[in-house]
Amino acid sequence: MTFRRRANCAAGSFALLVALAATGAAARADQTYAVSGQDVVHLGGGETRSKTVYRGVQRLAILRAGNGISYLAHVDYDKLVDGGAEHASASSTSTLLPTGEMQDGPAHDPDYLTILDQPFAVQLDLPTMRDLHHVKGPVPFDFPSPITGAPLRGTLRRLPDAMVGGTRALGIAFEATGPLHGALPDHPALLLAGRIHMRGTAYYAYDTALLIALDATLEIAGNLDADARHSPVSILYQRSLRRLEQQSARAVPTPHAS
């Protein structure tokens, strides 16, 4: 998964709503999410194909740390790669400082499954929630590609409210495109020339302004730059998270359990 900021940005996860600080009223809280995703790579017009599928359970803890607020995410998951399966875990930490800056790390999230490594902020401030609630039409925006830093241009729009895990939530969606020239972090041998298309939906709880549901997709379509035949390449990354109700969360074992 490549929803990351470019190297010359501050370290850590890219958030589409990165300018929107988390609410300072947050106290310690624990959230549990069902996590799923897949990576699909096609090379040479479908001649070579690989697919990786992820399924797991994520726990997010939010607690005050000195004058800041820390977000700690841990995921236990199964990783299925072309018929084979393995169990893995990932973790990520971010701290909201009194200055409003988000300090990321430590982290070990090689498959980009934690809620802190997604293209939407884990929590919004209350004024932003109010502003989003009153959005009537598509809002244009530009932001750096999580792969190359080149600008992606698109729109943000309001979705109807929904119930997620028994909680009323505000919905937003985005879609953006931009160019790609160069290698991918998880495929450094592939030098690509093509386009990136990102789209996603996110739902934030009205009572806490926390991200409680997410669907994010990143698609790459292009050609191998270093290949005289300009072989076509297509890559799909998908990630989904859904917060579980407390009763359901207690009943869900980690994927490794039998």
Image (tube, helix red, strand yellow):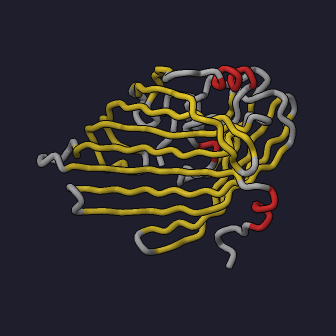
Q: In this orientation, does residue 106 appear?
A: no
Count of marks, rendered view: 0
In percent of the image, x 69 and y 39: which residue is there?
169
In percent of the image, x 46 and y 45: which residue is there?
217
In the image, residue 175 sits, relative to residue 114, either above or below, namely above
Q: Position of residue 245 (x, y in %)?
A: 76, 55
In this view, the residue in front, 99 or 205, is 205
Quarter of the figure with residue 64? top right
In percent of the image, x 65 and y 42: which residue is there?
162
Q: In this orientation, does residue 24 appear?
A: yes
Q: Position of residue 253 (x, y in %)?
A: 72, 69
- Return the residue found at the far bottom: 258
In this view, the residue in front, 236 or 94, is 236
In the image, residue 157 sits, relative to residue 188, either above or below, namely above
Q: Is residue 138 left or right of residue 27?
A: left
Q: Is residue 101 left or right of residue 186?
A: right
Q: Position of residue 241 (x, y in %)?
A: 61, 51
Q: Position of residue 199 (x, y in %)?
A: 46, 38
| The C terminus: image quadrant | bottom right
In percent of the image, x 22 and y 44: which residue is there?
223
